[in-house]
Amino acid sequence: MLKVTDLHASVGDKEILRGINLEVKAGEVHAIMGPNGSGKSTLASVLAGNDKFTVTSGSVTFEGEDMLSMSVEERAHKGMFLGFQYPVEIPGVTMANFMKLAVNERRKAEGKEPLTAAEFLRLMREKSAVVELDAKMTSRAVNEGFSGGEKKKNEIFQMAMLDPKLAVLDETDSGLDIDALRIVATGVTRLHTPQNATVVITHYQRLLDYIVPDVVHVLYKGRIIYSGDKSLALKLEKEGYDWLINDYKE
Amino acid sequence: MKEREEDILKKLESSEYEYGFTSDIETETLPKGLNEGIIRLISQKKGEPEWMLESRLKAFRHWQKMPLPTWAHLQIPEIDFQDIIYYAEPKPRKKLSSVDEIDPELKRTFDKLGIPLEEQMALAGVAVDAVIDSVSVKTTFRETLAEKGIIFCSISEAVREYPDLVRKYLGSVVSYADNFYAALNAAVFSDGSFCYIPKGVRCPMELSTYFRINAEGTGQFERTLIVADEGAYVSYLEGCTAPRRDENQLHAAVVEIVVERDAEVKYSTVQNWYPGDKDGKGGIYNFVTKRGICHENARLSWTQVETGSAITWKYPSCVLAGDNSVGEFYSVAMTNNYQQADTGTKMIHLGRNTRSRIVSKGISAGHSENSYRGLVKIAPKAENARNFSQCDSLLIGDKCGAHTFPHIDSRNRSAMLEHEATTSKISDEQLFYCRQRGVSTEDAVGLIVNGYAREVLAKLPMEFAVEAQKLLSLSLEGSVG
């Protein structure tokens, strides 16, 4: 589904991604871990097409198509979803209106008719249950005055609404209490099917108790330096990164 | 991200004025220029009584002695007041007795604007007094309103048919001596609307007037007078679209509202006159005086969405004369390209326990300049007066300006005044977030702007709110490249 080959990206003169190789197949869950500042969030942003970063070399294909030549919205329409680490507030725009536009833009790109108001409301009710989201939330402005937990639940709610092929979740577990973590993680698991794929970026093994990864990668200084199965996350939790990164320190 | 922003700006600048068409209607005009002879001709054409002519002449003589106001934050090109035609009316081909008989050209203009003049109006429950250029062409729902004793007609008709009411109220809130443009209007006003709601009557429908400037080089000088008698209620809508013109056109309207004891008036405006092209050529000059007086327990609410005109100079105000009266001002003013707006309100607290609320949302894009100017005045006898003001500015791009000039003049120590202000930009993060969800940059800008203006838009009557939302997006959108 997703194939990243020798991807280099920089912001200004500073190179942050220095040759990423990653392949994600349908039905898989990948976890990306690594110390702060290693480029995890940058990777997520670059995959989504944020033009704050410049891709200097390498390639990314999504279902065989060159993704780097696509605009941010085209990638979204093809089924790429980014769960934001810091979801942005859009004052005065209700979640319902925002989602209606998003869902129908995706449908338009797929050559489908827009949903009727009734169909949309039904979809919204059904999907808000996935993350135990209070139905009242959808009449509030996008992320405005949301608590940290609500913002993250809201990201997964949007993921449920848009039904992406590939979801990249950037530290969706940060700032969550135990209950919220369970709800968010269970929501992600429920949305997982053999047809889609999930990449979770996290610092903590506890998220992976719920979302069991097929592969765990360690990102350090802009490269994936080590990959393993889910036991790697447990080891990292216990021993930290030192045993891995010593060789790479400059 | 720099590049992205420039793209957006380019798109915004290439935005075309959707209603920029002209219609070909035979127009009867007077020669250019202004003198006592022209005023006599206008008055004569309208078959006015002597007192009306005298009142016009008095205003004209005063106007001649007045200097142009220069205090606004506006660059106004010199206007040659002798190079303007002060009166024009579309010639009806024959006397109209039904909708079908309206000049087909005129009808097409209405249709292009989406003004539903016909049967659907009945269903929508809106009575329209459509004004093309200066003379009311058609008034609907007169009978329905007449049953309740409500008068809704053109001001010229009111001068002839209801002289006592007009003499009592015309100029009572905005005197001819008030300001330069009000004096000019009092001298040459061509037509406009008159509305009277009798004691205790609640107007069963929203009254609406569409103004449309049409004839080339014609200044339009509308005069509106609304009187809500004791305990009455009316919601009044004013909406404007004008066809594209290269030549600048002057508009100096006056709106006067009298809200008697226990009465309530809501006045809503959506203004979308031709703003000029993307280089700042052409566009309407809009110098408007709007003011209402509230007597005891009365309430007046102004709501405006201003997206058009090259220059806007407009301060809908409330004189809170009676005890416990309430004044409100809700405004969205959007400027793009080289548009300039200096708009706001005056809340004059004279009575005890008077309250006012100001919510102003400015949006500037392109090379435009957008100013809020407000005055909250608490008179010595206005015990326990309250005001809350909120003035927000939203900037799109880095070549536009937003300015706030709030004035407070409190002469009573029991007054309580609050002022909040914010300035914000549409952030790259917001745009990226929207785009990641599949929403195009252009739609995202429209969405964010509408969200920002929501508090004000929510004050508009439903059908108007929808139109206003479209307008806001439209005024910012270009063709997607």
Image (cartoon, rainbow, N blue to C red):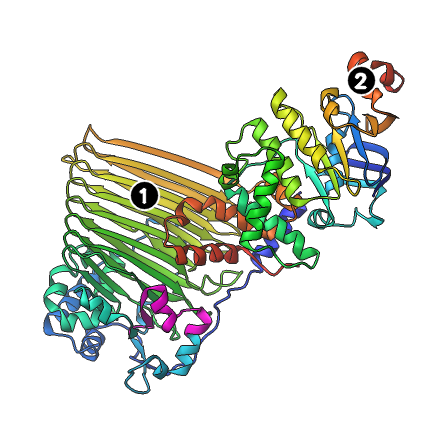
Quarter of the image where the C terminus of chain A is located: top right
Q: CA–CA distance between discs 1 and 2? A: 63 Å
Give the residues in magenta: B110-136
Residue B173 sits above or below residue B430 on the image: below
As helix, strand or loop, the secondary structure at mark 2 comes to helix
Residue A235 sits above or below residue B404 on the image: above
Position of residue B452 measured from the top left corner of the image (x, y, whole percent)? 47, 44
Decide if residue B272 is on the left or right side of residue B181: right
Q: Residue at x 44, y 36 (%)?
A: B422
Q: Residues within 10 Å of mark 2 (few under 14, many from 20)?
A: some
Residue B56 appears in the rendering: yes
Quarter of the image where the N terminus of chain A is located: top right
Residue on which disc 2 sits: A234
Position of residue B86 measured from the top left corner of the image (x, y, whole percent)? 29, 72
Residue on which disc 1 sits: B374
Residue A223, image quadrant: top right
Residue B447 sits above or below residue A133 on the image: below
Of A97 and A226, the residue lying toward us: A97
Q: Specify the subunit that label 1 lies on.
A: B
Residue type highlighted by circle 1: Gly
Labels 1 and 2 touching (C-beta < 8 A): no
| View extreme (top): residue | A239
Q: Residue at x 54, y 53 (%)?
A: A117
Q: Residue at x 71, y 24 (%)?
A: A207
Q: Judge whether residue A218 is colored magenta.
A: no
Q: Judge whether residue B115 is colored magenta.
A: yes
Decide if residue B232 is on the left or right side of residue A245: left
